[in-house]
Image (cartoon, helix red, strand yellow):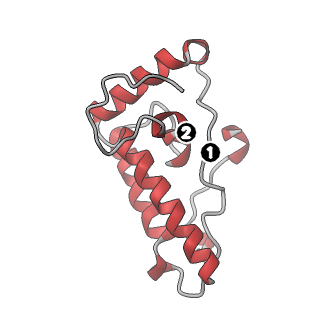
Amino acid sequence: GLPTLHSSSPMAAPAASTSIDPYRVLKVDRDAAQEEISKSLRLLELRLHPDRNLDASDEQLAANKARRETVRKAYALIGTEAKRQEYDEKWAKAHPDKAASGQLLAGPALPASLGEGTAKAARPAVAVSSLV
């Protein structure tokens, strides 16, 4: 793996920054405003919350819980301007070819359907093909 680059946050394990792409997980563009990132976190947290999915099976609730944890980890990486700048700098150093060409880090993102039992009207329109 990659060496740890001055990680000052105990919340973000060194492997976390290479295992997920927080922009994909939070479904925001790399140039999104910080407010948009926070709004995405709130919407995803609400959409995946057990109280919003009362008719979900135990398996769906467990999957949603895991997805909420992934959302929180992604937000921990880019949730503030300082953390976002740190993440972007580490990513650019680790992926100079992709950073120069503007490509996103390939990594697991939340699926387009964020859990069964979620009201479709609450889902934003997302071009999933643009994320692949």
Label 1 SS = loop
Q: Which residue is painted at 59% across and 68% down in the image?
A: 63
| Pick the front one: 108 or 84 | 108
The N terminus: image quadrant: top right
| Pick the front one: 83 or 30 | 83
Label 1 CA crowd tier, 10 Å (few <14, some 14–19, many 20+)? few
Q: Where is residue 93 in the image (x, y as percent from the top left)?
A: 47, 15
| Pick the front one: 90 or 44 | 90
Circle 2 sits on which residue? Answer: 19
49 left or right of 132 in image: left
Q: Where is residue 43 in the image (x, y as percent from the top left)?
A: 44, 61
Q: Which mark is residue 80?
A: none
In this rendering, the answer to whether 53 lies above or below 28 is below
In this rendering, the answer to whether 62 lies above or below 96 is below
Q: Where is residue 92 in the image (x, y as percent from the top left)?
A: 48, 18
Label 2 SS = helix
In this rendering, the answer to whether 114 lies above or below 105 is below
Circle 1 sits on which residue? Answer: 108
Q: Position of residue 122 (x, y in %)?
A: 54, 68
The answer for how far apart the CA atoms under marks 1 and 2 are is 7 Å
Residue type pointed to by label 2: Ser
Disc 1 to disc 2: CB gap under 8 Å: yes
